[in-house]
């Protein structure tokens, strides 16, 4: 429903590129129909924009992210109860720095500027901004100056707090009508307000977990200042989504791209509720699945749900398409194109349905690159799609995060086995086999991945981690087996904790578990001579290796 960002904050940081084209399938503002209280997040290229929207949604208020230069008349058409300006990597006083429509500040809609957003507000309204004598990055002491909570942003909080800062510029002088609400040792205006015009600014980041009380500040803004009703739930989302799918498809028919993961499974269940027998699910076995996965998907959906399902064995054609390909972006694009080709061929056999339902998520759109975000990696179901599509896309979860989709899945009655299945990329094991994808290398990885999954489940940690899997590296290493020299493959084990997949930390698995996994991999999978454990967080890395 909105375009998103990825990048780093603060003057001097490497900011995201800004490709000018709207991402394929991202609807314009005119396509959004406000059906409940709404808070708009204007994205200035921040690494945290998606977290702002997420925190607002956690308050049970719907939020969307739109480009920073969205015209005011388009914004007001959505009837927002509040507008939040995100952070960003630019400096507001530099030529070409991104700016929102200045009429936003005179619209009467409450505005909260965060980091760059606060600096922009101050700059546009007559204040003075510039480089800080000392930059602030990381945990910082914050002192609340607002006496007796006159403004109310810090209502219920201590006077001395720890917040998360990420900036090189500061506001040196306030615009007329504003006063300071908080400061730090090096930032005189860490929070500002002009309550008469309902304009507020925060130099720190309330949306990140490193500001543990930040949600309370957002709550005070969204619920108290903006007057939003906390009425947005996944139940209301399901009801609205069913209506929207029916309106979009009309009397037509659709096919649903089913992988067996929670995203596509929930999309299938939602579309089936909306369309009934006018929906057919198509499960494409591209030969890049985990051990026993294809059979399990068919069993669950054909036998348990009663949803019409077509099972396509396309293993050979995908492997042929990937022969000799080593570049990960090329892999993703080729797989995305081949998927659409398979669906198009099946559509002919099914009487040419006009619509294709996909379980595309917000992070897929974000990482594939948007008008205000750099491309991190192309997701096959977003940037990997061909220029000319034989279908109209229906993507009910395009503005949801993974944990939100899991709630939708539970609302729709899907079993826990599907709801809590670890995320699995659409390109499958092709992007966990680093280098060329061959049947032999796929089989080694399948066996290794099955061991990692089995041992994690046996240790009772499957629900504790967001994702855990094996990666086959494109290198060999010397080993010893039975007093003889070996020269075998290297497996990297990756396990992370996360809330939404946009940021992640490496999981501190027990050493005994890692030892068991390593012993089994080298002892049971032919050709593996070394196991390493990935201890990199996201960022700077991504969860997947390719």
Image: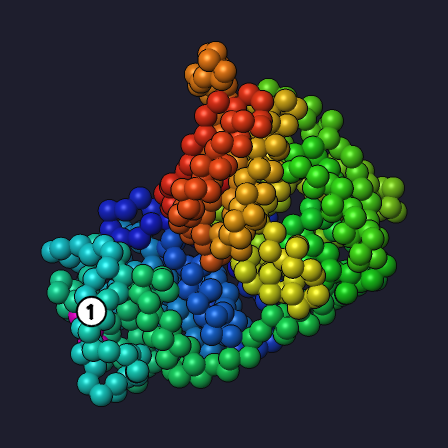
For residue 165, what is the image quadrant? bottom left
Q: Quick check: 153 left or right of 61? A: left
Question: Which stretch is magenta?
Answer: 179-183
Instruction: Tell me residue 344's x, y (percent).
Output: 78, 40
Q: Tell which of 346 and 488 is nearer to you.
A: 488
Instruction: Tell me residue 189's x, y (percent).
Output: 19, 69
User: Dot 1, how many residues are within 10 Å of its Cα: few (below 14), some (14-19), or many (20+)?
Assistant: many
Q: Is residue 363 visible?
A: no
Q: Which residue: 20% across, 69% down?
A: 142
Q: Is residue 357 above or below residue 516?
A: below
Farthest residue to the front: give it: 482
Q: How is the image coloured?
A: rainbow
Farthest residue to the top: give it: 484
Please count the marks in the image: 1
For residue 429, what is the image quadrant? top right
Q: Is residue 212 above or below residue 383?
A: below
Helix, strand or loop for the magenta stretch, by majority: strand
Q: Which residue: 38% across, 53% down?
A: 47
The residue under label 1 is 142
Answer whether residue 181 is magenta in the image. Answer: yes
Q: Which residue: 55% across, 79% down?
A: 231
Q: Which residue: 73% across, 56% down?
A: 268
Instruction: Tell me residue 517's x, y (percent).
Output: 50, 37
Q: Is residue 324 visible?
A: yes
Q: Which quadrant of the figure contains the N terminus?
A: bottom right
Q: Quick check: 225 left or right of 411? A: left
Q: Quick check: 353 left or right of 465? A: right
Q: Is residue 170 above or below residue 181?
A: above
Instruction: Tell me residue 504's x, y (percent).
Output: 42, 50
Q: Quick check: 329 left or right of 512? A: right
């Amino acid at each position: 429903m909105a375009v998103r960002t990825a990048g780093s904050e603060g003057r001097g940081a490497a900011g995201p590129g800004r490709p000018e084209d709207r991402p394929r399938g991202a609807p314009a503002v005119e396509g959004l129909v406000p059906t409940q209280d709404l808070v708009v997040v204007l994205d200035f290229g921040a690494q945290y924009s998606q977290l702002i929207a997420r925190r607002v949604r956690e308050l049970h208020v719907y939020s969307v992210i739109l480009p920073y230069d969205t015209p005011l008349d388009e914004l007001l058409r959505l009837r927002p109860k509040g507008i939040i300006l995100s952070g960003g990597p630019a400096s507001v006083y530099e030529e070409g720095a991104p700016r929102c429509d200045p009429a936003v500040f005179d619209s009467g809609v409450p505005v909260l500027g965060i980091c760059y957003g606060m600096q922009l507000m101050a700059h546009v309204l007559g204040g003075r901004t510039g480089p800080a004598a000392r930059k602030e990055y990381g945990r910082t002491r914050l002192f609340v100056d607002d006496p007796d909570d006159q403004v109310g942003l810090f209502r219920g909080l201590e006077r001395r707090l720890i917040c998360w800062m990420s900036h090189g510029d500061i506001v040196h002088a306030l615009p007329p009508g504003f006063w300071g609400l908080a400061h730090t040792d090096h930032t005189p205006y860490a929070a500002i307000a002009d309550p008469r015009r309902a304009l507020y600014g925060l130099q720190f980041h309330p949306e990140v977990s490193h500001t543990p009380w930040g949600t309370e500040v957002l709550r005070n803004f969204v619920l108290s200042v903006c007057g939003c009703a906390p009425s947005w739930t996944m139940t209301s989302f399901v009801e609205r989504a069913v209506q929207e799918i029916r309106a979009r498809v009309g009397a037509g028919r659709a096919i649903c791209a089913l992988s067996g993961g929670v995203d596509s499974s929930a999309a299938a269940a939602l579309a089936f509720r909306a369309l009934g027998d006018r929906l057919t699910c198509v499960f494409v076995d591209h030969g890049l699945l985990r051990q026993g996965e294809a059979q399990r998907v068919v069993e669950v959906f054909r036998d348990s749900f009663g949803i019409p399902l077509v099972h396509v064995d396309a293993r050979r054609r995908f492997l042929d398409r990937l022969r000799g390909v080593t570049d990960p972006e090329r892999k993703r694009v080729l797989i995305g194109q081949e998927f659409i080709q398979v669906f198009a061929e099946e559509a002919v056999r099914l009487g040419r349905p006009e619509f294709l339902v996909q379980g595309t998520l917000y992070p897929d759109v974000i990482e594939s690159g948007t008008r205000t975000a750099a491309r991190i990696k192309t997701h096959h179901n977003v940037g990997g799609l061909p220029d000319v599509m034989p279908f109209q896309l229906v993507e009910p979860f395009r503005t949801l995060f993974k944990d939100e989709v899991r709630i939708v899945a539970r609302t729709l009655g899907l079993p826990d086995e599907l709801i809590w299945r670890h995320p699995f990329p659409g390109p499958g094991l092709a992007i966990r086999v680093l280098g060329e994808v061959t049947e032999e290398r796929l089989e080694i990885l399948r066996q290794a991945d099955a061991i990692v999954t089995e041992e994690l489940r046996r240790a009772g940690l499957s629900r504790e981690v967001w994702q855990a899997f094996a990666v086959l590296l494109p290198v060999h290493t010397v080993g010893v087996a039975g007093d003889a020299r070996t020269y075998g493959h290297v497996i990297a084990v990756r396990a992370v904790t996360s809330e939404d997949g946009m940021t992640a930390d490496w999981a501190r698995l027990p050493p005994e578990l890692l030892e068991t996994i390593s012993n089994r991999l080298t002892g049971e999978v032919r050709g593996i001579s070394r196991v390493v454990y990935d201890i990199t967080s996201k960022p700077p890395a991504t969860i997947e290796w390719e």
